[in-house]
Amino acid sequence: MSEIGKTAATPPLSPVQQQAMKRLDQAATQLEGVFLQLVMGAMDKTVSHESIFGKQSNGERIFQSMLDQQRAEEMAKTGSIGIAKMLEEQLKASVLADASQEAKVNVKRSSGP
């Protein structure tokens, strides 16, 4: 039988490596969310902020910014854009090489961009 199309079996990841990969996934997804939020903010600057009710208030702008942040985070979680997936593929080898250190990294987002 031909060896073409067969891939070498990858050994299962240790618990530390699994934790490191989980943290990489979280960080990459958050980065994609920040990027999408920046894109949405740039798009928002291109439209008029006046309607038949008048100029948009500061409260409305703050609410719109918060809404854009939530939308960006939810879009990133779906993985439909693919930025996080590409980052994970490119960084997987280096994360696994130092998994014991990478598994300890705090990737919680503490504040907005």
Image (tube, helix red, strand yellow):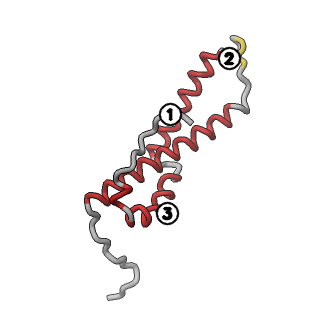
Q: Nearer the viewer, residue 63 or 107?
A: 107
* Residue 40, image quadrant: top right
Q: Nearer the viewer, residue 46 or 91?
A: 91
Disc 3/disc 1 C-alpha distance (Å) = 26 Å
Q: Nearer the viewer, residue 20 or 62?
A: 20
- Look at the numbered disc 1 and give the secondary structure of its residue: loop
Within 10 Å of the Cα at label 3, are there few (<14), some (14-19), or many (20+) other Cα atoms? few
Give the foreground label among 3 and 2: 3
* Residue 9, image quadrant: bottom left
Disc 2/disc 1 C-alpha distance (Å) = 25 Å
Type of amino acid at the residue the image marks with label 2:
Gln
Within 10 Å of the Cα at label 2, are there few (<14), some (14-19), or many (20+) other Cα atoms? few
What residue lies at 66% left-to-right and 15% top-to-bottom? 57
Type of amino acid at the residue the image marks with label 1:
Ser
Mark 3 or 1, nearer chain start: 3
Within 10 Å of the Cα at label 1, are there few (<14), some (14-19), or many (20+) other Cα atoms? few
> Is 74 on the left-hand or right-hand side of 19?
right
What residue lies at 62% left-to-right and 21% top-to-bottom? 61
Q: Tag on residue 90?
A: 3
> Is 76 on the left-hand or right-hand side of 10?
right
Please provide percent x and percent y for residue 14. Answer: 26, 62
Q: Tag on residue 67?
A: none
Q: Residue furthest front?
A: 101
Q: Which quadrant does the C terminus fall into? A: top right
Please provide percent x and percent y for residue 7. Answer: 36, 76
Q: Tag on residue 56?
A: 2
Q: Which residue does the numbered mark 1 point to in the structure image? A: 111
Mark 3 or 2, nearer chain start: 2
What residue lies at 43% left-to-right and 66% top-to-bottom? 93
